[in-house]
Image (cartoon, helix red, strand yellow):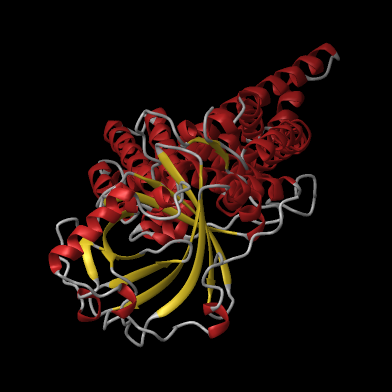
Amino acid sequence: MIGGADERRPPGTSMHISSELLDQPVERAARIVALDLLDKAMTARQRLGDPSDSDAVHDFRVAVRRLRSWLRGLGPWLEDSTPKKAVRRLAKAARLTGDARDAEVHLTWLHAQRSALSVRQRRGLSWLVEQIETDKRHDEHTVTTKGGRAFDRAATALSRKLPSYRAHLDSDDGETPRPFAAVMAELLRDHATTLSRRLARVEAFEDEKGAHAARIAGKRLRYLLEPFAKHVDGGTELVDDLARMQDTLGDWHDVHVFSAAIVRASESAAAAEGRRLSEAVVEGKDMARALRADRGRDVRLGLLALAGRLHERGQEAFVDAKSKWLGEGDPFVARVDGVAQSLAARAGRSTEIERKYLLRGLPMLPDNATVSEIEQGYVPGTRVLERLRRVRTATDDTRYYRTIKVGDGLIRTEIEDEVDAELFDRMWPVTEGRRISKRRYVVKGPARTWEIDEFLDRDLVLAEVELTNADDTVALPDWLASAVVQDVTGEIEYANATLASGDRGVTEEAKEELDEKERRQGDGDSPADHPRITKEPLVPPRRRRRREQPAVEESPAT
């Protein structure tokens, strides 16, 4: 690969899902969320095997399923970081939690039925509870051992692979790094369409498989939205409703699963009764007495009563689902589309629309101007520009940024991320020979903010202003108008990347054009003598004396 860059999580930092994540390249943001979900699953894994922690298996199951849903949904942008063997082991860990989860749900419901059953019916209840508790202990042991081992191996591989990826920076395919928000908008719409289609297909109580498929579609949509729901309008409310729909359809699904379990339990009870009667006959016991004794131990009356109550529960869940969720696919799609529109609008804000002007020199700036010194360098590449920037303010506060820019002219895509000094120092040597240094003055006006760049390594002053729309009209403020020579938006020789390519000034053609323009204007004044150029520095004199030096000194090469 020509012109690649490793994207790594700084050592010792934890994942933080913030609103700024939506502006990041999707490949990076998807990994940040995946690592956060993996960390939560690993924390839940550590709780397995603790007999005092009744929620351990449930929380582990949910954490693993959230992680699996994310890896599946963002698969196209994570494929080089999700080994197939790790994904299979993660699936195995999730699958092994199923029986333990079902047993926990069934026991919770059974304990709530005791008061509604007769004394004879409670024999069946107690017998069934004992059977399920025995199975649950075995299932939880399986989760802790086999499931835990499968997860541990998957987590080891994912922890190694997810923190880094390689981005192609100078490929000729013309592809632009896509913001996370734009990709999530599309994924949410796709999942909402699937949910709507599945909800529309469910019409009868017996269609448990269809209801379960709709539940899975809703859960996957919810898991995609959850990591950033609070940062987008309508996201939190939508997640809450999806959770309620999941609970309702889950009750319906559990009824069908538990009904099958009661049928098996009844068959097991009947077989046990038959064995006892056969043994009594073989042993020569009185048949009538044996029948009366076994009738006292009969659990099937209680199982039959439970089956009836379970059917009632299922009908209630169906009615609830039908009134609230079935046939509600279109409203869900509309709500998701509203969230997606907010995401798409945010993604559009990552597009930079600006105009750039060549100045004769530094104008007389307003009193509210702020100043900072900037040193920036470019990672080698042609199609995509990756920039590192170190910014030092007048108070000696230093911050570091990493930016990806695609395109040129009036409209460009720009994605910026603040990084730590360690990552900056590790990447900075790559920019050797492709650097510039400048002093930036920022002037906030009533309508627009202007940035005036006075280059410290060449005789050049440029002004930039960011626009909302490409066709916006720019009115030059009075303090700037007389210093403007011409609009140089889109002229490649004034691009920072071009200026950083090794030439210590602008191109000869640009110099000749500037000289010709000034001759036509009859302006014999030099930039230093221009009446609107300040002679007073806006930075402390100590900094002004470093005018011929880079804004930030480099460490000696070793």
Residue at 33% x, 41% y: name it.
186
Dividing the picture into quadrants, the one containing residue 306 is top right
- Horizontal placement of 334 versus 221: left or right? left
Q: Quadrant of the N terminus?
A: top right
Q: Is residue 91 above or below residue 509?
A: above
Q: Is residue 59 visible?
A: no
The spot of residue 251 in percent (x, y) is 47, 43
| Residue 90 % position (x, y) | 64, 32
Q: Is residue 219 left or right of 394 when viewed as pictured?
A: left
- Residue 446 in the image: x percent, y percent? 24, 80
- Whether residue 423 is visible to the viewer of this picture, yes or no, is yes
Report the residue that reaches farthest toward the top.
282
Residue 532 or residue 471, whichever sits in front: 532
Quadrant of res 553: bottom right
Residue 384 in the image: above or below residue 92:
below
Q: Position of residue 172 (x, y in %)?
A: 38, 28
- Residue at (76, 24) in percent of width and height: 290
Determine the residue located farthest toward the right in the rendered image.
283
Quadrant in the picture for residue 482 = bottom left
Q: Which of the pair 291/350 is nearer the observer?
A: 350
Identify which residue is drawn at 18% across, 61% down: 517
In the image, 139 versus 219, the foreground residue is: 219
Q: Is residue 206 above or below residue 543?
A: above
Residue in the foreground of this view, choosing between 164 and 190: 164
